[in-house]
Image (cartoon, grey):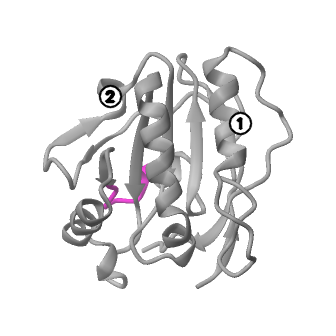
Amino acid sequence: MAVTLSTMLPLGTLAPDFTLPDTMSESTLSLRTIKPSTATLIMFICNHCPYVKHVNSELLRLANDYQSKGVSFIAISSNDVINYPQDGPDKMKETALELGYTFPYLYDESQQVARDYQAACTPDFYLFGPDMKLAYRGQLDGSRPGNDLPVTGKDLRQALDCLIANKDIPSAQIPSVGCNIKWK
């Protein structure tokens, strides 16, 4: 496991469109077809990363708290499944069902979507406003496996609350930290 920081895509970047298979519904979804009116949170995650496992329960709480407020949640796994078969589509669906994901869990086999977003780690978070311009990228909160801080989602919740209230999101944003994306 290589500890990696997110690359911090420039704020204001227009969300790159994509069309990927959803392991949950077994259909193909496009970013433009699932975009809500309020915000879109794109999360690069995977099944095996201890950083993602550490925050999974908070991801579910966030979705439960904000989907009813018009925020779309989209999870994407871009890991190389040849060397990390536990991150393959069948295992993704299994994990999503076991944990109770209420959002699509998309499979980026070519890894092009991760490249387009300059995703570097899991988890890596990208929050887009109604204009699909990047408003926040960074950490969920300060909790990490083993640092004994509670997982609260504080930083991402603040960004979501500001976006929903049409207030400025603080520009001081801390990179997310996690396992590196497993490139082919």
Residue under label 2, please give it: 34
Please provide percent x and percent y for residue 69.
Answer: 47, 23
Q: Would residue 123 be found to the left or right of residue 34 on screen?
A: right
Q: Nearer the viewer, residue 73 or 121?
A: 73
Residue at mark 2 to residue at mark 1: CA–CA distance: 23 Å
Which residue appears farthest toward the left when viewing the image? 26
Magenta span of residues? 107-113
Q: Nearer the viewer, residue 38 or 30?
A: 38
Quadrant of the drawing holding the C terminus: bottom left
- Of helix, strand and loop, which one carries label 1? helix
Task: Name the residue: 57% across, 72% down.
Answer: 51
Res 137 quadrant in image: top right
Q: Would residue 17 be found to the left or right of residue 178 on screen?
A: left
- Of helix, strand and loop, which one carries label 2? helix
Quadrant of the drawing holding the N terminus: bottom right
User: Which of the labelled discs sits on residue 158, or is there none?
Assistant: 1
Task: Name the residue: 26% across, 66% down.
Answer: 98
Q: Would residue 135 be found to the left or right of residue 147 on screen?
A: left
Query: Tag 2: residue type?
Result: Ile
Please provide percent x and percent y for residue 155.
Answer: 72, 45
Q: Nearer the viewer, residue 71 or 148?
A: 148
Res 34 quadrant in image: top left
